[in-house]
Every structure is written in C-alpha cells, then in structure tokens.
Amino acid sequence: MLQITHLTMTHEKDLTDLVSDLSLVVNKGDKVALIGEEGNGKSSLLKWMMNEDLVSSYIQFSGQIHRDFTHYSYIPQQLPQEFESLSLNDYFFGPSEIDLDYAALYRYAKELQFDSERFAHAQLLSSLSGGETLKIQLIKELAKETDMLFLDEPSNDLDLPTLKWLEHFIQNTPKTVVFVSHDETFLSQTATKIVHLERIKKRQVARTSVQALGYATYAQERKDQFDRQLQQARNERLAHQKKLERHHRIHQSVEHAVRNTHDASAGRLVAKKMRAVLAQEKRYEKEAETLTEIPTQEDCIRLFFKDIEPLPAHKAIIELTDFSLQVGTKTLVANINFRCSAQEKVGIVGKNGIGKSSLLKHIYTLLLEAGYPIGYMPQQYQELLNQAASPLQFLTSSSDKKEEEGVLTHLASLQFSREEARHPISYLSGGQQGKLLLLKMVLDACPVLLLDEPTRNFSPTSQPQVRQLFADFPGAIVTVSHDRTFLKTVCDTIYHLDETGLREIRKEDL
C-alpha cells in the first residue's frame, strides 16, 4: 500500500530535522500509529504520506515514497476552515459529493447514533460541538470508496460509546489505517505497527523508529530495552573505572621506580615496564570507545504545582440546583443538580452535543462572578491564546529579563527550544499550545481548575506525567474528559450528563 525509503523531513523555519532516515512498509490491512512528543512532526508526516504537496510550503524532504493506492479518506485534527460556513445539507449533499455510498452513510449514522434526518438541516458545521464535528466527518469519510484511511487524532472529542465503536471499527476493517493518536488506551486497542518520532539531545537530533508491535507491547519492550542498556552501560563503565584505577596505581609505582632507579641494568628493566604500562593505557582508551552507549530518550514533561493554597476542604465552591442548561433558545438539560467542594476532583462524561463544554463554561462564569482565582483550559485553545503572540509573550507580564529567563526555563522543561519560544503561537502544534495553557495554570497557582479535554493533545510519553500532575493538585478540579485512564487516575467522582441531568457513575463502568 505504501513504501517509504530513507525519508528525512526538515522544517524550513529552523532547519531542524523532524524525521530522520525513515524506511517504512505499510501493508494492506495494517493499522499504523504515529506517536511522539508535541511538535515532532506527526501531522506533517501523515500529510506527506498522502501527498507531499500538502507540506511543501514549510517542509524540505529527501527520500522516496511509493504509493500503491489511488483513493484515500482523511480526517484532520481540526475541521478545515472552508467547511465551517457549510450547512449539514451542503456538507453531505453538495455537488462534489458524488462518490458517497449512501447506504453506508445511513448505516454509519445509525451505528454512531447520529440522527440521519439532520443530514438535510441548514445548521452550520461551525455550530456543532467538537465531538459532533468529528462524528460527521467519520460518517462521511467512511462512506467513501477508499482503501486507505488517514486519521489525525481521531479519538479527540469523541464520547465514550463512539470511541469504543471507532476502536472496534479500526480493529476489524480491511482498510489500511494510518493515524496519529495520544490516547494510550486507544493505541493499545488498535495499533499493529508503531512509528515513533523523537527529538533527543535537547531537541536537536531527530530519531525515528519503527516496530511491528501493538502499542502496549512496544511501550513495555522500549522501557525494558532502555533499562537493560542503561544497566549494562553502567556496569561496563564501573568495571572499566576499576581497571583504570588499578592501572593508575601501577603507573604511579612504575613512574616512581623510573625516577629513583640509578642502576643502568635495573633502569632498562623499569623502562620496559613503563612501555608495557603505556601500551596498556592505549588499550584501555580503545576499550572505552567500545563500551555500550548510554541510552538516550526524549525528555518528558517536568511540571509541578507549588505554592497552591487550597480553599477549605468543606467549602462548596459550586452549587447548582434544578439548573436548566440552555444554548441559545434550546434547552439541552432541564434538571441539573451539582455540588463540588474546594478540594474535590470531578469528571464529567456524556454523549457528544449534550452540552458538557457549555456546562463547564457556565461553571467558569459563576466562579469568575464569585471572585475565585481559576485556571481554565478550554477545548478550543484559541479562546485564550492570541495566535499572533509568541509563547514568551503569552507567559510574561513585562519585559523583565529575570522573568523572561524563568519562563524560558519552564518552556525548556516542556521541550520548547528557544526558537519555538519566540515563534508565533499559530506555528505551534495543538499539543504545544496545550502545554502553554498547562504551564500558565502552574505559574498562576490558582486553587480551582476547569479543564475541557485536558489530555487530548499530549503524547503517550507525556500522559503519565500529566495525569500525576493533576492527581497531585491539592485544590478543586472539574474536568470534561473522554480519556478513561485520566478519569480513573485523577477524579474522585465521575458524573454522566444526559437529558435528565447528572448522575454519578462508577469508574469501572467507563
């Protein structure tokens, strides 16, 4: 289906390599996952696989590709801007949509619990929730006659039933699927081959590896191999150091004899010993070059909440009684009763379009009116991030050099290079933008956090640190999430939102 030979991809902005000497064969039916830290080029590689013209404006590349497919479907990380002004009717029944299998279209709508009568609605795509936007793209793209499916973060924003449906679909479809994902559970359920993009040595060196393994096996084998190599390298260096110390003592002894020997015959013997010692020294130098290399891996997130002064544990910061959730003139949920205390961590799940993000925004407004300091991560980062500003400008309040250096240090701990810290935010990947909001919350040290899909753009290697960061947070968290591992690790209580209100559910039911 697809064969890549010795591909190297270089970003024109910084002339830094994103992909290094990648050779990859994608066979029919493969489920290939592209993983790696934020900003490592996963989406660019995905687009390049489809058509190199899609990235030629900012990527230089060398290497060859052979594509043994003619038609493919593609679902990007965000809805293309040209689609936002389309109605549902135009999106599904526009003049260009002549290659759709309409029987499949309606079948997928039923399976994904999307009312097919809405296909003909005048509702604009821009008014749909993130999950519904992704769901309609799935319905349409899967109904096309294609043999390759390219997905960029397909698990983002989907409700749990749809997420499980998509996992089952990818497992069982005969189509070849190449996808980018950060969801560890989703990866473990779907991938049969892993392509890992890394940037090591302070993000200056690209390293690209391919393994025909499932994600859980790959992650465990990678950890085991790293640990084995690290232990072997340490043992060899310890043994080598002991040899050097013993040799150094011998060298000193012979050197002392050379200086204090005045007899010619004895001097020749000592000189011969010195030659042997020097020869052995050269052998040790050569041995040092053959020692097992100390393994390197990409740094993960290093962030910690500190100086947080949580509000009293018994204090209720949010209380809703018989609250009616409305969007415009439409009532989504008529009877919401909800209470959250100042040191409680609460998760909210529910189907796409039910109003989870709207409820979180309402809570945000209430807390602002009550005067609480709040850290907020919306689903759409653009709500808080000026795309024309740089990360440095976003995180600093003045031109003070000391503050700037402190922020640069924090950004470096999140794998931002100094160049990336001064790029416009619009140049950054979704994951890097998420990191900026994460860092802003850490720096602001607010006792209350509102999070809408907080892990959606963080890499699998960063996910454990992100989960631990929020699990250790001493204040209150209210989060909308479909990340099952995150919800189980971080939240004390989980609620399901539907038309009847909020009801508590067990973690085992996720």
Image (cartoon, grey):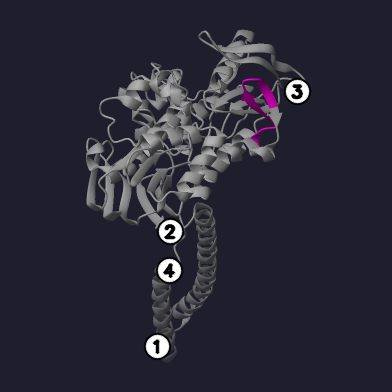
Q: Is 258 drawn above or below residue 439 in the view shown? A: below
Among numbered discs 3 and 2, the one appearing first in the sequence: 2
Q: Choose top left, top right, bottom left or bottom right for residue 71.
A: top left
Q: CA distance from mark 4 to mark 2?
A: 34 Å
Mainly helix, strand or loop, the magenta region? strand
Report whether residue 68 is seen. Answer: yes
Q: Which residue is label 3 attached to?
A: 313
Among numbered discs 1 and 4, the one appearing first in the sequence: 1
Q: Is residue 491 magenta?
A: yes
What label sits on residue 212 in the rendered view?
2
Q: Residue at x 56, y 26 (%)?
A: 451
Task: Name the kind of residue labelled 1 in the image.
Answer: Arg
Tag 4 secondary structure:
helix
Q: Are marks 3 and 1 in contact (CB under 8 Å)?
A: no
Q: Residue at x 52, y 8 (%)?
A: 329
What label sits on residue 309 in the rendered view?
none
Is 280 or 355 nearer to us in this picture? 355
Q: CA distance from mark 3 to mark 4?
A: 58 Å
